[in-house]
Amino acid sequence: MKIRMSVLLLAAAWPAGAPAQAFQPARPVEIVVHNAPGGGSDLLARFISTLIEKEKLLPVRTLVNNRPGGGSALAMAYMAEKRGETHSIALFTSAWMMTPILSPEATAGFNDMTPVARLVLESAVVLVKADSPYRTLGDYIEAAKKEPGKLKQAGGSVQTRGNFVRLILQRATGARWVYISFPGGGERTAALLGGHVQLLVAEPHEVSEYVRNRSLRVIAQITEKRLPAFADVPTLREAGYNVHSDPTIRGVVAPPGTARNVAAYWEEVLARMVKTDAWRRYLEENQFEDGFQRGDELVKSSAEFVARMREMLQDAGLKVYR
């Protein structure tokens, strides 16, 4: 399937249809995520599934379907094959926008899907094990300069923020360390806790338990301003590193060719969900920023995000294919 990068083509992906109230799911709905259990999208999907059931926002159950692999490529291909399917939605992240740009093998991308809603914006933190000798990011970088290739960083696919940050820092400082990709957030965290890697870039809600029990320590924040939970930890810019800090985007898409009335139905379900007290508490507890946008707004903001990220990737020396 040819990937369409045009906003106009994406907007046109919504065919005219009946009013939203004409559609209602009649069987269990699958929520597709692109990572293994324990990853950011998996945790968010399972919370959404539970919340939707608790708030009785759907007349049917929801089931999380993990489709890890290829830096979101397998999940996107799976969704692309479900063209017009009315009982499947997927949680997308920024990786759904970046993978097609960086991977010539990608057969589908965010712009092939039907936009439903953006839910949250998420900053990231840089972590080490609690007993690590690296008290600051500068300590880690200096150690990497002294022994190039010895230190290791855990992360998701190479198309994710953790690797982009590594590449930019390496280019700016001359330090060199290894990036090891893991399919799930749980595996990445376990690798750091076990001492198999020395650094991890992660979303706060993936590692909050380990920060609270002091198994892991935050040494920097990838955000423009400090998160309330880490008020004493510097941002990358404050630490002296000029690194782009666009937050990760998380939201929902439907398969290609989804009728407008079906997409509107899912949009309204999510619009009701984000107004619940439980959702507001979840955002606060996990250091999420409320980023709710409806489908038409999402089309515009995603195009702007891709343009910024394409420029950043080129500045980092990466080859851009689209």
Image: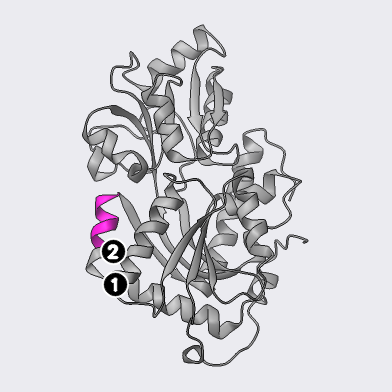
Q: Nearer the viewer, residue 126 or 29?
A: 29
Q: Which of 141 and 100 is in front in this view?
A: 100
Residue 133: horizontal and vertical position, in percent? 33, 13
Residue 6 within the segment the image draws in magenta? no
Compared to residue 141, the image places residue 79 above or below, namely below
Q: Which amino acid does label 1 sit on?
A: Lys
How much space separates mark 2 and mark 1, taking CA atoms?
Answer: 7 Å
Report if the CB atoms under discs 2 and 1 are less than 8 Å apart: yes
Disc 2 target residue: 279
Residue 170 visible here = yes
Tell me what residue is drawn at x 42 percent, y 17 percent.
140
Q: Which mark is residue 39?
A: none
Classify mark 1: residues with Cα within 10 Å, few (<14), some (14-19) or many (20+): few
Under circle 2, the secondary element is: helix
Rendered-image quadrant of the N terminus? bottom right
Compared to residue 231, the image places residue 65 above or below, namely below
Tell me which colouring the rendered structure shows: one colour
Q: What stretch is highlighted in magenta?
A: 280-286
User: Does residue 70 appear left or right of residue 194 in this picture?
Assistant: right
User: Does residue 14 appear left or right of residue 4 in this picture?
Assistant: left
User: Does residue 79 appear left or right of residue 277 in this picture?
Assistant: right
Tell me what residue is drawn at x 35 percent, y 16 percent.
134
Disc 1 target residue: 275
**How many discs mark residues in the rendered view?**
2
Compared to residue 103, the image places residue 155 above or below, namely above
Q: Which amino acid does label 2 sit on?
A: Trp
Tell me what residue is drawn at x 28 percent, y 22 percent.
130
Main structural element of the magenta stretch: helix, strand or loop?
Answer: helix
